[in-house]
Image (cartoon, rainbow, N blue to C red):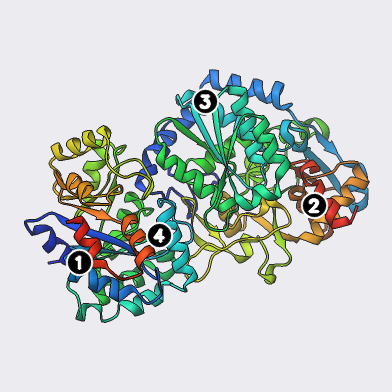
Amino acid sequence: MSYHANEKGYYGEFGGAFIPEMLYPNTEELRQNYIRIMEEPSFKEEFDQLLQDYVGRPTPLYFAKRLSEKYDTKIYLKREDLCHTGAHKVNNTIGQILMAKKLGKNRIIAETGAGQHGVATATVCALAGIECVVYMGEIDIARQAPNVARMKMLGAEVRPALSGSRTLKDATNEAIRDWINNPVDTHYIIGSVVGPHPYPDMVARFQSVISKEIKNQLLEKEGRENPDYVVACVGGGSNAAGAFYHFLDTPEVGIIAVEAAGKGIDTGESAATSALGKIGIIHGSKTLLMQTNDGQITEPYSISAGLDYPGVGPMHAHLFQSGRAEFISITDDEAMTSGLALCQLEGIIPAIESSHAFAILEQKKFSPSDVVVINLSGRGDKDLQNYIDYFKL
Amino acid sequence: MNRINQKLNEDKKLLSIYFTAGYPNINDTSKIIQDLEKHGVDMIEIGLPFSDPLADGPTIQASSTAALKNGMHTELLFEQLEGIRKTVSIPLIMMGYFNPVLQYGVEAFCKKCQEIGIDGIILPDLPLDVYQEEYEAIFKKYGLINVFLITPQTSDERIRQIDEASDGFIYMVSSSSTTGAKTGFGDETETYFNRINEMKLKNPQIVGFGISNSETFNHATKKTKGAIIGSAFIKHLTQNGADKIDEFVKGIR
């Protein structure tokens, strides 16, 4: 059995393309071409070159000595926080901008929540000299002023999503509506392993460079390709998809997905989709999502804007349902405490999203000989104000 | 014979109206349906509101949000529609997004529709292949016609597939857009109308999106069986409440 998408974009019963007919030609064009394009030597060469020279890959796999001592196990950090623009997001946007060029598109749209994917998209559009429109919830625009400014400096137009709850899910709706209205010249760069097929699979493939490097680096450092555990936080799930990708069908590697419990799973202010979600359709994908009994999609909550999504990518829904991955949810408080601990033990300020992944060390006991790789998906610069407010710094 | 098919057999251009259930007020559903029939509308699409209506522009989105805020939900809509067949004989179509139907249970939803006397269903985000593989048998069991959409970007090959899979009419989206985004038709739309007309499909076509008045209605129905008005009627409801529906219909034809 494989945990990868089948040719129709299903991971078990999750995935597919539940889209209105207006989007069919757009996604169909992509579906028919994405694998062929990604396998073209000229595409691979340009993608790899940019990842190396522009993004700064390979990112280090760092043995966290003091953290390992504290938890009496061997912990490696995959340093995606050192990528250009500050997080793993750019792996995907580099891939998709090259894809858009191959497809002859001359306009890019994207959605963004906290602004990280928006910045990563605006960055590659500047690099490619292509027009860029980023949809962002009106409320998020107010909360994330520095990233809005970054996108503008990079030449992108930031359009407020004024519908619904005016956050990430609505920004995604607006981007999809833009694509319906501009079906020919526009490519939609989705920021996570969500949306209709082929997006979850395509984004996972672009992010899979993370686990590919982990294998090579671990071989060098430990004389083995496979860790005992790989750990990543999951909102939509793109950094996790990348970190898990080459281990999915290797059962001896334990997979741990960390969700945001917000103020606690039962508080009504949470984003722990595996615990609170039911199967349904969101943004064109059949997956687990948080919704009312009546099928209305509800608003999630997490202190971390990047985990604040009411669904989860179909790959992760399948990993959860099949039991292949262990899902752990971490509260705001636990994540913040672990984030600060990482600063003080290793001199690394993590993004609050990534802090969630570290918090499992307090909950789950690993053995001293275990090799545990934690994907440090982003750096904490963008979260400074949150850290300041939380710790009264 | 299904009421939709009967209506399609009539020798006239059909006017179909969409409204969002629960808007502008929670209990307007029956009055709107009765008034639309009384004033000569041929078919009605009852919109089941959804939190995330991807294919809709601002007007229908806002009506959907307001309807949910008013407390509309699937079971309540079914309650409101119970007994509707004692007062109207117009073809009724449920239109919504797939997730609320999935949560209700597709079979339970279809069964309820049949009991009430609903004739057809439009779920824009239920794709053709999934419908055929998983749900066609259920829709047919309960005598419901499933209506598919086509757009100017839909290939001839796919239009043929959709025509083959349809047994009522084809919902012909007039332009590449969300609802209410454009009014009127340009040259591209004309080319599209001609292309579809020349394909001689077995199912009649009813045009939706971009129709707001008698001029656009007449234009859209020149080579098709009828037209659907949504956003323009929602705007009427916003301004007038569930009143003066006669004036709105007279303004169209």
What amino acid type should be assigned to the residue bearing mark 2? Answer: Asn
- Circle 1 residues within 10 Å: few <14, some 14–19, many ≥20: many
Nearest to N terminus: mark 2 or mark 3? 3
Camera-side mark, 2 or 3: 2
Secondary structure under the numbered disc 3 in the rendered image: helix
* Residue A257, numbered circle: none
Q: Residue beneath label 3, please?
A: A39
Where's residue A365, x and y in %? 83, 58
In contact (CB < 8 Å): disc 2 and disc 3: no
- Circle 4 residues within 10 Å: few <14, some 14–19, many ≥20: many
Nearer to me, A3 or A160: A160
In contact (CB < 8 Å): disc 4 and disc 1: no
Nearest to N terminus: mark 4 or mark 1? 1
What amino acid type should be assigned to the residue bearing mark 3? Answer: Glu
Camera-side mark, 3 or 1: 1
Q: Residue beneath label 2, please?
A: A386
Q: Is residue A34 above or below residue B110?
A: above
* Residue B91, numbered circle: 1
Secondary structure under the numbered disc 1 in the rendered image: loop
Residue A140 as seen in the image, left or right of residue A97:
right
What amino acid type should be assigned to the residue bearing mark 4? Answer: Phe
Asked if both marks, 3 and 4, belong to the same chain, the answer given is: no
Q: Does residue A361 show up? A: no
Q: Residue beneath label 4, please?
A: B98
